[in-house]
Image (cartoon, helix red, strand yellow):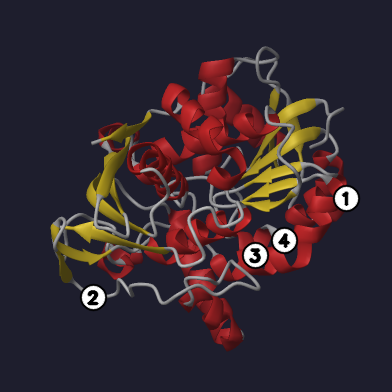
Amino acid sequence: MNPNAEFDIIVYGATGYTGRLVAEHLARRYGVGGEVKWAMAGRSASKLAAVRDEIGALAETPLVVADAADPADLKAMVARARAIITTVGPYQLYGSDLVAACAAAGTDYLDLSGEPNWMRRMIDAHHAEAQKAGARILHSCGFVSIPFEAGVWFCQETAKARLGGPVPRVKGRVRAINGGLSGGTAASGAATMAAIQKDPAQLAVIMSPFGLTPGFEGPPQPPGNAPGDDPDVGPVAPFMMAMINVKNVHRSNLLMGHPWGQDFVYDEMAVGGPGAPAFTDLGSLPGGGPKPGEGPTKEEREAGFYDVLFIGIAADGRQVRVSVKGDKDPGYGSTSKMLAEAAIALVRAPDVPGGIWTPAAALQGRLVDRLTANAGLSFEVE
């Protein structure tokens, strides 16, 4: 963390669809210059000013001009903040220089990446440097993967309290979901596919549940790639986000020192069989999904929600069940609040050492408490 910075948080990409929502959340909840000192950043001062006015932020909200293609711009921006929130993706196209700048400067970094091939490259390139500089780098700070990663952590804490210890098996089961994908999510998927075609070696990271745990390979995990019948919930179908969420959960376990065991098994499926709930298949999106910068309307965001069940199973068969629910559409309304609140939790946690973290491993109960109080999430024992 950069302790002498001018701002707690700079929202980079504030003129984009999701960045605008992050800035709007900060403006509505924290104002300017009070509890959280934050600024909006992007390539165009005039666009930043227009968005500031459109979202109802105060006229004195600071604006920072920076271009992802200009390393000097990035270096200057990073020097002014304790933490950089970036919504400028696909990250494998526009994020690498910013991660490098934050890791070198000791500035915290948070993104929404669901691009495991790129995340692994960042881990390999910058984890040791970030540890040395004290920079906390957090990928996947939205619907990918906070409700799942923090949900498993909460499930394990519940198991410790009720069963006397962590459990070797957790199931994530998406019971209900209502919300649209962003153009950024679709673009990230396309960029990942293009990267694999260019460098087929990246496919190994994509396909492995342990693609983000360099040096550690756990036991075989359930494939989750075909419909089936789960004795605990009934019919289940593949869940599109599982491929990245499972990797982040296993990285969490690794970063915390394997408190859930080196034989820990985790998978995610959607309850209800093929087609229910949504988000089971990218190919089902009309016209291949939205374009970058596009997303659901405000009404659609407000009508959205999600409900995820986690079942922790002990070696002797005893179970705990917990749920994580969100009050807005997962990809935008909820994601923007999670990203903002994760950043605030991080800058208020100076005891967390540097390195490339997952959100729940770095912040644990502090993240759960903050999301419950300020981001419309609930974590409940059933």
What is the x, y in percent for residue 364? Answer: 54, 38
Residue at (23%, 58%) from the top-left corner?
270
Q: Can you tell which of label 1 and label 2 is closer to the viewer? A: 2
Q: Are marks 1 and 2 in contact (CB under 8 Å)?
A: no
Residue at (54%, 50%) from the top-left corner?
112
Nearest the eye: 13 or 207: 207
Label located before the other in sequence (4 or 2): 4
Q: Are marks 2 and 3 in contact (CB under 8 Å)?
A: no
The residue to which callout 2 is attached is 226
Label located before the other in sequence (2 or 3): 3
The residue to which callout 4 is attached is 96
Q: Is residue 242 toward the left or the right of residue 93 in the image?
A: left
Q: Is residue 82 toward the left or the right of residue 337 in the image?
A: right
What is the x, y in percent for residue 363? Answer: 59, 38
Nearest the eye: 273 or 366: 366
Spatial CA span between label 3 and label 4: 7 Å
Amino acid type at image mark 4:
Ser
Q: Is residue 341 toward the left or the right of residue 134 in the image?
A: left
Amino acid type at image mark 1:
Ala
The residue to which callout 1 is attached is 72
The residue to which callout 3 is attached is 93
